[in-house]
Image (tube, rainbow, N blue to C red):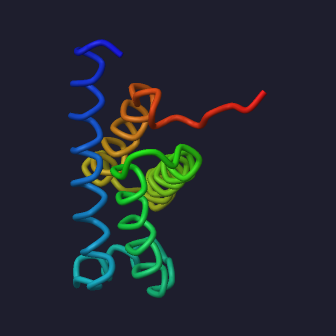
């Protein structure tokens, strides 16, 4: 892995981890703005702590060494959660401002996944 790719990976991964951790904590604590957003999107409030806990666990999975398969699941979960958020905001008629956060986290997820080092990938057994 080149030094450039390593830098890209760690910048994207740390920003992704920061974003997912921050939103996960807000969801676990059920901050008023988060509750209002879930009501606006017409989702049940029990989704908040569930999503928050999954995000925190996903951050742990992508930051710890090895466990390639677990990382793949975490990246997939991040992608599904954030693409679901984008679609939910679009379906609710929200403006581009509401789409920025989830869209940015999708981009960071893809960049982090794409530039991950070999030691953080699933090892194929042939």
Identify the residue at horizontal 36%, vertical 60% (top origin): 60
**In this rendering, is residue 93 above or below 116?**
below
Q: Quadrant of residue 119?
A: top left
Residue 121, given in percent of the width and then of the height, sits at 52, 35
Residue 10, given in percent of the width and then of the height, sits at 24, 34
Residue 39, given in percent of the width and then of the height, sits at 40, 81
* Residue, far front: 126
Identify the residue at horizontal 55%, vertical 48% (top origin): 76
**In this rendering, is residue 36 above or below 121?**
below
Front position in the image: 92 or 31: 31
**Where is the C terminus found, in terms of image quarters?**
top right
Identify the residue at horizontal 48%, vertical 87% (top origin): 46
Residue 7, given in percent of the width and then of the height, sits at 21, 24
Q: Is residue 15 left or right of residue 52?
A: left
Front position in the image: 79 or 56: 56
Q: How many marks?
A: 0
**Where is the N terminus found, in terms of image quarters?**
top left
Q: Is residue 60 left or right of residue 12?
A: right
Identify the residue at horizontal 40%, vertical 28% (top origin): 117
């Amino acid at each position: 892995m080149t030094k450039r790719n390593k830098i890209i990976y760690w910048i994207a991964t740390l920003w992704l981890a920061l974003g997912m951790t921050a939103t996960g904590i807000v969801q676990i604590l059920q901050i008023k703005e988060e509750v209002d957003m879930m009501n606006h999107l017409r989702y049940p409030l029990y989704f908040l702590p569930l999503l928050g806990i999954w995000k925190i666990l996903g951050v742990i999975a992508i930051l710890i060494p090895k466990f390639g398969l677990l990382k793949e699941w975490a990246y997939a979960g991040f992608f599904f959660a954030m693409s679901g958020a984008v679609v939910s905001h679009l379906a609710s008629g929200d403006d581009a401002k509401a789409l920025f956060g989830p869209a940015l986290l999708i981009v960071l997820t893809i960049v982090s996944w794409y530039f991950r080092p070999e030691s953080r990938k699933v090892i194929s057994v042939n």
